[in-house]
Image (cartoon, rainbow, N blue to C red):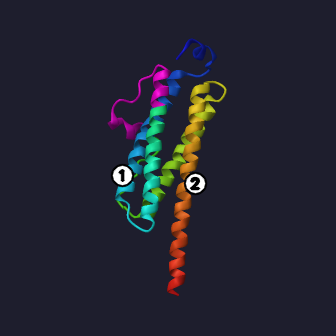
Amino acid sequence: MGRTAVEISNVDNKEIIAVLNEALSEEWLAYYQYWVGSRLMVGPMRSEVEPELLLHATQELGHAELVLNRIIQLGGIPVLNPNKWKDLARCDYEEPSDPYIEVILEQNLRGERCAIQRYQSLAAMTDGKDYATYQMAITILNEELEHEHDIEDFIADIERLKEDIRQFRL
């Protein structure tokens, strides 16, 4: 971190780096969950949902890069061993053992809601104290909110599709 950044920072860098390493672990797990789930997914609207989940995966990878860069800027070392990701992450990785589209979407929705909490907390922790980390947290938070909205829309669309099919059968 540069001299001016240190002078205006009013946070415990070790604490922020620890939180950022937790977030980094969560982003890697989220990336994999989106990526593998989109590849295994079966069910209605799969062809519409898969590209969006792959986009979300790419964005989660981008979040990991932002977080990793901030850890380094703060003088920290990013978590180096992928085996530690599950131990550090507060957000669960949910294995897509049931590839049905609604199950995959619900798993990803829970992950997004956890990520939203993570970045809300990080933004609150750094607001007015560490401007760069705060801005990064807000940027990622906005994308996580968008992901939640996308997933909720897909779930609602599938429910409407199922209701239309039920009514058609009557």
Give the residue at x 49% y 21%. Answer: 73
Q: Please, what is the three-letter code of the amino acid marked with disc 1?
A: Val
- The quadrant where residue 65 appears: top left
Q: Is residue 126 above or below residue 9?
A: below
Q: Is residue 145 above or below residue 79?
A: below
- The quadrant where residue 116 appears: top right
Do the CB atoms of the residues marked 1 and 2 lie less than 8 Å apart? no
Instruction: Specify few, some or many for label 2: CA neighbours under 10 Å numbering under 14, 14-19, or 20 or more.
Output: some
Query: In the image, 65: left or right of 80?
Result: right
Q: Please, what is the three-letter code of the amino acid marked with disc 2?
A: His
Q: On the image, numbered disc 1 is attached to which residue?
A: 36
**Marks 1 and 2, the one that precedes in the sequence:** 1
> Which contiguous range is marked in magenta?
67-88
Instruction: Specify few, some or many for label 1: CA neighbours under 10 Å numbering under 14, 14-19, or 20 or more.
Output: some
Task: Give the x, y percent position of residue 93.
Answer: 41, 48
Give the residue at x 63% y 34%. Answer: 124
Q: Which is more toward the observer, 142 or 30? A: 142
Q: On the image, numbered disc 2 is attached to which residue?
A: 149
Q: Which is more toward the observer, 147 or 17? A: 147
Q: Which is more toward the observer, 65 or 123? A: 65
Which residue, as the protein is rendered here, is positioned at the far bottom?
Answer: 170
Give the residue at x 51% y 49%. Answer: 112
Task: Give the x, y percent position of residue 44.
Answer: 44, 68
Give the residue at x 45% y 30%. Answer: 68
Q: Main secondary structure of the magenta part?
A: helix
Task: Give the x, y percent position of residue 99.
Answer: 37, 61
